[in-house]
Structure formats: C-alpha cells, structure tokens
Image (cartoon, rainbow, N blue to C red):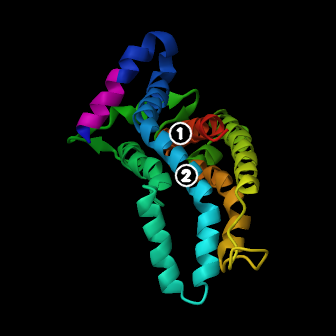
Amino acid sequence: MSVFASLVEHLADLLQPLFGATSAAAAIVLFTALVRLLVHPLSRAAARGQKARAALQPRIAELRARHHRDPERLQRAVLRLHTEEKVSPLSGCLPSLFQLPAFFLLYHLFSSETVGGRANALLGHELFAAPLGGRWTDALGDGGVFGAAGLVYVGLFAVVAVVAAFGYRLTRRSMAAHPAPVAGGGAAEPVPGVAAVTRFLPFTSFFTLVTVAVVPLAAALYVVTSTTWSVAERAVLYR
C-alpha cells in the first residue's frame, strides 16, 4: 500500500501548482479518470455485448417457446446460442469488477493511520474544509450539515443526485427499448423474478448516495468521479 500512497502523493505534488491545498483531492479524481481510461475497452466490449444480447432476444424467445416445459434443456440451448454467437452474458460485469481493487485501495489507504510504519501524511489533506480521511458523520459532528465540512458533502450529494437521476433516465430508456423476456416468448407472463428486478434496477443509481455517506471522503471522491464517468460513458456507448 505504501507504493500506492507514493503514487497519490506524487500526483498531488504535480497538481499542487494548479489546485493548491486541494491537490490531493484532484489527484484522486485524476487517478480515477486514469483507471476508467484503462477500463474503457472493457466498457466498450460490454456495450457491444449488450447490443448483441438484445439482438438475440427473438431467438431466445423461440427457444423458450420450444423448451418451456424443460428448463434444463432451455438453459443448455440458451448457453449454446451465446457460445455460437460469441456473446458473453457476463461481459457487462467486467468493468465494475476491474475497478473494485482501486476503490478498496483508496478506502484502506484513507482509513489507515500509518502507511509503511510511518504516519499517513495523506490524512492531513483536505477537500476545501473536509479531511480526505473523514466521513460524513465526522462532518456532522463538526459544524453540522451546513458547517464548513458539511457543505462539502452537501455539494457531493447534489452532484450524485443529478448524476443518479440522469442514470435513472438512461436505465429506464434502455429497459423500454429492450423489454424483459416473457415465459413462452409471446404475450405471456414475465419470467419469474424478472419483473421484480426490472422494477428495482433503475433505482440502483441512487445507492451511490449511501456509499458517499459512509466511506472516507477520498473513497467517496473516487465513487462520485467513477459514477459520473459511467453515466456519461453509457450515454455515448448505448445511444
């Protein structure tokens, strides 16, 4: 972790002439952008995969109509179709999975008092009046919602709410363009469980608000930056 701490410190030093006291926060935003650039090819592949899966839906509906009495045979037929068309059902998960190590590194780094046996100097950095190692509960205890640190979180929550609302609209639009599959492939009842997931899915964008509220501010910056990037990326790749 000391290597990662040195990377953040070097980025902060490079950005210090432009951002002054908030250079460490800017370094985290830049680091997040670099991670997202590295993951972008996977995001493009995931977008192609989703479009390919959408194109397969009529054929999958035919398989459901043909094998609706034999779920195991239906599953094998659907998997065989995906294999023949070289479409991975899991491709959409890869961008998120590859970002998790970076998030947990930041979380651990800004939750640790020491790094490499020395005091963690990064904990002394701030985003305006809010320490990067602090949490929303700390801000509430030091001035309340509208205190100096609390206002930083108010700004972050506002950004997250706007991004989440835009993500909600994108998800609803995508779901309208690609309706949930139905059992039997015709005008029948939805496949069991799909309706509940479909109703719940658009609201997942707002879970970022909870994450920002409970993790260290540095990790919250990563989440906000990454989520904003994701929504903008989806708007371009899935248009």
Left or right, residue 55 beside residue 123: right
Q: In x, y percent, where is residue 74?
A: 52, 79
Q: Secondary structure at mark 2?
A: helix
Residue type highlighted by circle 1:
Ser
Residue 226 shows which numbered tag? 1
Q: Is residue 188 magenta?
A: no
Q: In x, y percent, where is residue 88?
A: 44, 57
| Residue at figure coordinates x 60%, y 81% from the top left | 66
Q: Label 1 crowding class (10 Å Cα cut-off): few <14, some 14-19, many 20+?
A: many
Magenta residues, as a range? 3-10
| Residue at figure coordinates x 63%, y 41% from the top left | 238
**Labelled pair 2, 1 in contact (Cβ < 8 Å):** no
Q: Label 2 crowding class (10 Å Cα cut-off): few <14, some 14-19, many 20+?
A: some
Q: In x, y percent, where is residue 133?
A: 46, 41
Is 84 above or below relative to 50?
Answer: below
Left or right, residue 212 beside residue 112: right
Residue type highlighted by circle 2:
Ala
Which residue was labeled with disc 2? 52
Q: For the view shown, which residue lies furthest in the left direction?
A: 117
Left or right, residue 147 beside residue 129: right
Q: For the view shown, which residue lies furthest in the top direction?
A: 17
Q: For the view shown, which residue lies furthest in the bottom direction?
A: 69
| Residue at figure coordinates x 42%, y 61% from the top left | 84
Give the alpha-carbon distance from disc 2 to disc 1, as whole Å. 25 Å
- Quadrant where the N terminus sits is top left
In the picture, residue 11 is in which quadrant?
A: top left
In the picture, residue 61 is in which quadrant?
A: bottom right
Q: Secondary structure at mark 1?
A: helix
Residue 117 shows which numbered tag? none
Q: In x, y percent, where is residue 135?
A: 54, 47
- In this orientation, which residue lies closer to the viewer: 237 or 84? 84
| Residue at figure coordinates x 71%, y 46% from the top left | 170
